[in-house]
Amino acid sequence: MTNGWYPENPNLGQEIQGAPGSGLRVDKGFLAHYQAVPIAAADDYVHAAITLAIGATQTITANITNPDVSRILSITGNAATAVGNVVIVGTNAAGVAITETIVSTGAATVAGLLAFKTVASITVPAQGAGGDTISVGVGDALGLNHYLTHNTVLASYLNNVLEATAAAVTVSATVLEENTVVLDTALDGTVVDIYYMV
C-alpha cells in the first residue's frame, strides 16, 4: 500500500462491458509504467574478480553488492582457462528464491537469462592452474514486475527520449524472473521508462 491507496490487481479477471444491451464483455487491461534509474552495465558490479582455487570450487557469500534494480547478471573471466559453471543464488523482484547457472567461456562476458534483485551466494568453478578469476556484474536486461504471456511493451524511453527501435522483450507466463526488457540504447545511469499492458 502506498499513500493510503491499495494497488489495483490485474489478476482478478476484471471485465469491461461491451456495447449496451449486447451482453458482450472483454477482460480489463492495465497499463503498467516501469520507471527506474539503472546504472550502466558493469562487469564487476556484484562482485569484483574472484580468484579461482586450484582443484576446488568456492562459494562466495561476502563482499557481494546487490543489483541496483532487478536485472540479469553477467560473468567475466580473465583467461581462456577460466571455464566452468558459475552458480548464482538470490531472489527475484518478488523476493522469491532463484538459482541460475551461467557457464564461463573464458575471458568473454556471458550474460545470464534471469533477473535478480538480490544475490546471496556465488559458486565459482575450480581451476587447473593459478591466476584465473571470474567477476560477476550486471547487464542491460531489466526485470519486469509482472508475468507476461506475450510482448505487450508499447514504448520505452531512455532519459525521457523515446527509443526509435523497439526494446527486445523476453516473456514468461510462469517464471517472473524471465520477463525482461533490453532497450535498444545501452543503459547509462539515466532514467528509464517502460510502458506495457498487463
Image (cartoon, rainbow, N blue to C red):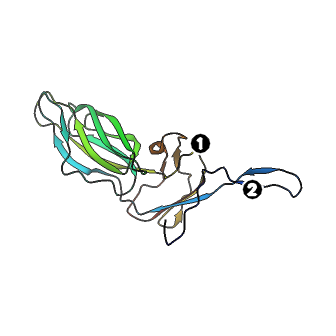
Label 1 crowding class (10 Å Cα cut-off): few <14, some 14-19, many 20+?
few
Q: Position of residue 31 (x, y in %)?
A: 61, 59
Q: Earlier in the sequence, mark 2 or mark 1?
A: 2
Classify mark 2: helix, strand or loop: strand
Q: Position of residue 178 (x, y in %)?
A: 47, 42
Classify mark 1: helix, strand or loop: loop
Residue at x-position 19% and y-position 45%: 49
Callout count:
2
Q: Position of residue 168 (x, y in %)?
A: 52, 47
Query: 12 left or right of 137?
Result: right
Residue at x-position 41% and y-position 65%: 190
Residue at x-position 33% and y-position 35%: 102
Q: Position of residue 30 (x, y in %)?
A: 63, 57
Q: Amino acid at mark 1?
A: Thr
Q: Quadrant of residue 196?
A: bottom right
Q: Which mark, residue 16?
A: 2
Residue at x-position 18% and y-position 32%: 57
Label 2 crowding class (10 Å Cα cut-off): few <14, some 14-19, many 20+?
few
Q: Name the front one of labels 2 and 1.
A: 2
**Distance CA(mark 2)–CA(mark 1):** 20 Å
Q: Amino acid at mark 2?
A: Ile
- Relative depth, front residue between 120 and 9: 9
- Relative depth, front residue between 30 and 45: 30
Q: Are marks 2 and 1 in contact (CB under 8 Å)?
A: no
Query: 16 left or right of 185?
Result: right
> From this viewpoint, which residue is outermost toward the right?
21
Tell me the residue that label 1 is attached to: 149
Q: Is residue 126 above or below residue 35?
A: above
